[in-house]
Amino acid sequence: MTDDTSYDVQIFALDPYVHKGKKKVVTYWVGWRVVKKRFKLKYATKALAEGFRSDLIAAARKGEAFRLFDGLPVSMARKSDEMSWYDFACAFVDMKWPHVAATTRRTHAEALTRATPAMFSSTKGKPDDALIRSALTRWGFNTTRRGEADIPEEVRRALKWVAGNTLPVSALRDAQVLRPLLDRLAVKLDGTAAAPSVVSRQRKILGTAMEYAVERKLLDSNPIPALKWIAPRKTVQAIDQRRVANPAQVLDLLGAVRAQRRSGPRMVAFFACLYYAGMRPEEAAGLSKHQLALPKEGWGEIHLEVARPHAGKEWTDSGKNRDERQLKQRDAGTIRPVPSPPELTALLHRHMLAYGTASDGRLFRGERNDEELPKGTILRYWRKAREKALSVELARTSLAAVPYDLRHAGVSLWLSSGVPPKQVAEWAGHSLEVLFRIYAHVLSGSSDAIRAMVEAGLKGAPNNAE
């Protein structure tokens, strides 16, 4: 007997049920208990119900162990039921790998790693939790690295333990197995609540995995919708106003970037693209000279066509840290024009004059790794800029906490300056629906402006109360 089976079984008499209606319809329930958990199955005829009940009795008399998660004797389990969660998760990763971006591959691995401990069938001999997480994320759920010959021995042992100690996929039919698995998505390693956006994204990944299990005939249907599981917190998509820097603060931050030694001056135009043109960091990282339509001075236009998100070389097909992809939520080859205000036009000309471009025309590059722009470099220079440009009190807040907040500041400026939302949505690469949801605080106007409008209306109305 293992931790997920038991010989403590009781099989009950048939329970006929007469359905209400003009025609007398009777169905028959077979009920039984394994340890303290009750199970039951419905059959359309008495003969079928008696046949199944007889099989249960025969298995119990032979001394067979019954599974705790679905109540079935081991001999009655379908072969497909016996595919372990770990083997299935690896198969799911392998199926998805050729068709998704490198960052999505990593996200799949992270979601499956977080869920897997809920599927452990035993804790005997279990390796350290941190080792298991690292082994699963970096090797087990990585299609190209799982079969490498130079996997560290401790990682190999951890993966072997996981492979031999996870429940079959069919266990997910049991709400008592599925609910704890989903609950794990809502909690970070330190026990605090995970970000709602992360929970939502990982739940979708698990949902897709369940659909794949149905396709592989490991499950009859996706069990997640029937569970009606609700994340502890609702997803909040609107931008926190406290993160959005005003124009004066942005200029101070860009100045603080320029003042840093070594690559500081080289990074100014990169951060400026996020603010003045509303680019995502991966779009600025992929910016090339041929995408620029700039006059010597004044307003120009930039034609975004690729993104280079940082994923890590273990997740990309090229072996580089950055993956080259189409623009977010756009088909390959789609171009998104964005404006280049006079300030950005000047900064880009100055940057190309001083530093030139990479061999493939990219404007922003690192000094190593085939001139890739490291994510760590971006974050390091931004962190030091905040420390220099902001007061101690502001530096402790969420104001412009990450480079992406420059994009939020730029889009907010467009909206508050009166640029039509439809145009802003096109520049930002959003739908109108998403734009209104994320930047609701800008579109609704400031409290002072709203009060002024109300006061003006009141002053123009006749006073009949006097």
Image: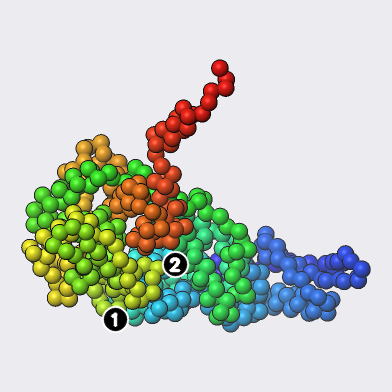
Residue 344 or 171: which is nearer the viewer?
Answer: 344
Rendered residue at 79%/69% (across/down): 29
Rendered residue at 14%/76% (across/down): 359
Residue 323 as seen in the image, left or right of residue 430: left
Q: Callout 2: few (<14), some (14-19), or many (20+) C-alpha neighbours within 10 Å?
A: many
Asked whether residue 120 appears in the rendered view, the answer is: no
Looking at the rendered structure, the kind of residue marked 1 is Ala
Percent x, y for residue 265?
A: 11, 56
Percent x, y for residue 70?
A: 64, 69
Residue 21 or 359: which is nearer the viewer?
Answer: 359
Residue 37 as seen in the image, left or right of residue 168: right
Residue 376 as seen in the image, left or right of residue 40: left
Specify which label sits upstream in the sequence, 2 or 1.
2
Give the SS element for disc 1: loop
Q: Which residue is mark 2?
A: 112
* Corner quadrant of residue 179: bottom right
